[in-house]
Amino acid sequence: MGLRIDQETFTDADFSLFRERLGDSVEALEQTLAIPGFGESEISVGAELEMFLMDADGRPAPLNDRIRTDVSDARVCVEVDQFNLEANLTPTRLRGRPFTALRSEADALLERVGSAARSYGSLPVLIGTLPTLTASDLRRTALTPCGRFHHIEHALSRRRRRTPYLLAFQGEEPMTLSADSIAVQGATCSWQLHLVVTPGEFTRAYNAAQLATGPVLAAAGNSPLLLGRRLWQETRIPLYEQGFGDGGGPPGTWPRPRASFGHRWLDGGVVRLFADAVRDHDVLLPVLSPREPAALAASGAAPWLAELRLHQGTVWSWNRPVYDPSGHVRIEFRALPSGPTPLDMAANSAFLLGLTLHLSRQPDDPRTAVPFETARGNFYRAARSGLRARICWPSENHRGPGWSSAAELLPRLLPLAAEGLVSAGVDAEEAGHLLWVIAERVDGGQTGAVWQQRALTAMEEYTDRRTALRLLTHAYVRLVASGAPVRTWPTPTRPAAR
């Protein structure tokens, strides 16, 4: 979705031709993937880091275009709301110390963004949902004045049953939010991973990713507060799914929502996912490429498939397929939250990718491990309850899946993730250190979400909630700056009287 869109309006003919090209593109993709040697490049990993911009009072700072301009780095771009930025990290081979490379680059980019932000009295914040946000921050006026966001907004507004539309959230303090725009998406920031996978291994790897995402998310929660309410450990998940207001129904209903975990195990290779996206979701942005997909495929080079890639970029599954015309396909893991620290995100990445690789290389297909509905349920239970979530996981003795809390299950999964990483060529010391960060986090019971909840409880003992949210956010930023993993963070205490 990084495409620059200068076109102001689209005609019925644009939509019709775009839909026709999507069908041709699916066929061209299938032909391309069948070419011997396509996508057989060395396995690599990349990442996208989303962040909030916060002013001195802890409030969102609508400065993304100014700061992006001052940073003057092609890796840094604006995101959906004017207080969101994104950093695109350089892909690296998944062997040696890839997570150290991603972490080091994230640290360097954050320093550059922070330096530019400080000149405006603001700071970047790595967190799933900014605790100090209010409903007024998430109105249409917050949208970044960029063509693609406004075009998506206009396209989805034509499909909505009503505007404003209601988002409903469960949790300790249930709430509803009346939204007039996809600007509500600006309340969520993610840490998105990209894993290159060969076409022949894609089905098994994708299903493994689906199975792995639930338990890993339970250990990674960092989004428990929205508009001053205590909700899910990863409130970002239901917020993102509902925030498009596209009229999609819950799982098992029609039309299918554009943002979801999916509705079945993959059984037809990566092409099936693209074909499903074309079949299940209508076109939002009919930006036509100068050349047709079939003509490009016939040239012998990997086709650009601009229409198909653009359309897939408007279907926001938590694990999303990506076709890259440079010559590969990959899985985009979208479920992990931003923050708390680059070290925590590197540890989350090692756990998710390692467990995915381990599961994908087992004799038994991940599809046979548990029913798809169970894997999907694991994901949402993890988002809701974090380490307390009940997770259904395949047993080691092949007697069928068994249930346990995430806190009990995760220590058994960490050695599997280590095996997956080392088998892929990751340095054993790197894998061990990062998975130790997860082990300590689980043992201490403190994710980023848990720390925020504990901090809010402590601060509300001596002040009102609005003030507590502001103080919590400032304390969070200071602890992130220390670089210490969240498992070590102390709960704030009442300041001494002056």
Image: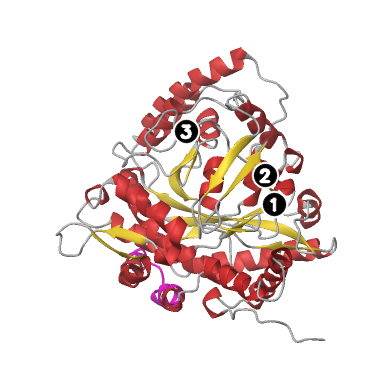
- Circle 3 residue: 301
Query: Residue 402: which quarter of the image?
Result: bottom left
- Name the N-terminal-most of marks 3 and 1: 1
- Circle 1 residue: 84
Which mark is on residue 240?
A: none
Q: Outermost residue toward the top? A: 13
Q: Nearer the viewer, mark 2 or mark 3?
A: 2
Query: Residue 111: which quarter of the image?
Result: bottom right
The C terminus lies in which quarter of the figure?
bottom right
Amino acid type of the residue tagged 3 in the rendering: Ala
Q: Count the marks.
A: 3
Q: Residues within 10 Å of mark 3 (few under 14, many from 20)?
A: few
Seen at 67% across and 42% down, the residue is 183
Element type where label 2 sits in the image: loop
Amino acid type of the residue tagged 1 in the rendering: Asn
Q: Is 219 drawn above or below residue 291 in the view shown?
A: below
Q: Label 2 to label 1, Cα distance in Å?
A: 7 Å
Seen at 44% across and 69% down, the residue is 96
Element type where label 3 sits in the image: loop
Q: Nearer the viewer, mark 3 or mark 1?
A: 1
Q: Position of residue 209 (x, y in %)?
A: 37, 52
- Circle 2 residue: 80
Seen at 72% across and 63% down, the residue is 466
Q: Residues within 10 Å of mark 1 (few under 14, many from 20)?
A: many
Q: Are marks 2 and 1 in contact (CB under 8 Å)?
A: yes
Quick check: can you spot residue 213?
Answer: no
Q: Position of residue 287 (x, y in %)?
A: 62, 25
Amino acid type of the residue tagged 2 in the rendering: Val
Q: Position of residue 248 (x, y in %)?
A: 49, 32
Q: Which residues, given as a range, are shown in magenta?
A: 420-438
- Name the N-terminal-most of marks 2 and 3: 2
